[in-house]
Amino acid sequence: MKTLIVYTSQTGFTQKYAEWLGERMQGDVLNLKEAQKKDAAFFDGYQAIVYGGWAMAGRVTKSKWFLDKSEGWKDKRLAMFCVGGAPNDNPNTEVMLKSLLTDEQNSRIKVFYCPGGFNYEKMSATSRFALKMFAASLKKKKDATEEEREMAEKISSSYDISDKKYTEPIAEYLEGNA
Ligand SMILES: Cc1cc2nc3c(=O)[nH]c(=O)nc-3n(C[C@H](O)[C@H](O)[C@H](O)COP(=O)(O)O)c2cc1C
């Protein structure tokens, strides 16, 4: 199963997952900017194509490129993975994954979540500012739930909860074992 993994990453977590999956599948890994330069024939050589993007306010960054292209890839095995700051068992993650695709897209594309983390050192100034504001608003919220309070504390500094093991379900799906 010749596999291509295309990714977008701001601080490196999604890139790391794309590379782990690339090694596992012995596939090719391309940054979205590079993939956008390729013509349609380039993608014909792959039986499986995966898109990885980071979670931003409940969406997957730049997934539109993949979803548009996927219209012409109906004979391929397709998957999308989202890398976020939330842990794998966060109930909001399940809700987010369910909202990403239409029913039609869900019938062709399998979606996965991989926990990444936060890296304030590598983040753009705009992202850093957005997150600090979000953390501050959660901290100030009078009726904040325990979960929200914990999240505010957690996203106030950098952390890494990524693990190669989260690529295994994606690989198994691509190989047709899941
Ligand atoms: C503006 C902004 C919004 C974010 N929104 C979410 C979100 O809705 N859910 C989530 O789990 N993580 C969210 N994150 C965290 C990133 O998805 C997380 O840091 C991810 O690991 C970044 O991946 P990257 O290193 O490939 O850029 C957000 C980060 C930023 C900067």
Image: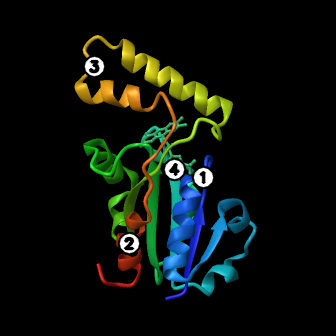
User: Could you say which disc has been placed on residue 54 in the image?
Assistant: 4
Q: Amino acid at mark 2?
A: Glu
Q: Quadrant of residue 148?
A: top left
Disc 4 under 8 Å from ligand 1? The reply is: yes
**Residue 159 place in picture, x, y as percent:** 48, 41
Disc 3 under 8 Å from ligand 1? The reply is no
Confirm or deny contact between disc 1 and disc 4 (CB under 8 A): no
Looking at the rendered structure, the kind of residue marked 3 is Ala
Rendered residue at 38%/64% (across/down): 166
Is residue 41 positioned above or below 79 on the image? below
How far apart in space, not on screen, are marks 3 and 1 (Cα)? 31 Å
Q: Nearer the viewer, residue 161 or 142?
A: 161
Q: Quadrant of residue 163?
A: bottom left
The image's colouring method is rainbow
Name above or below for residue 129 compared with residue 49: above
Report which residue position mark 1 lands on: 12
What kind of element bears circle 4? strand
User: Callout 1: 10 Å neighbours few (<14), some, many (20+)?
Assistant: some
User: Do the numbered discs 2 and 3 sit on residues whose CB atoms are within 8 Å?
Assistant: no
Cα distance between the residues tagged 3 and 4: 26 Å
Identify which amino acid the numbered label 1 is placed on. Answer: Gly
Q: Residues within 10 Å of mark 2 (few under 14, many from 20)?
A: some
C-alpha gap between disc 2 and disc 4: 18 Å
Dot 2 or dot 3: first in sequence order is: 3
Residue 17 seen: yes
- Can residue 72 be seen by looking at this rendering? no
Instruction: Kindly identify which residue carries mark 2.
Output: 168
Mark 2 and mark 3: Cα distance apart in space: 35 Å
Note whether ligand 1 is within 8 Å of mark 1. yes
Instruction: Report the Cα–Cα distance between label 2 and label 1.
Output: 19 Å
- 72 over 57 or under it: above or below: below
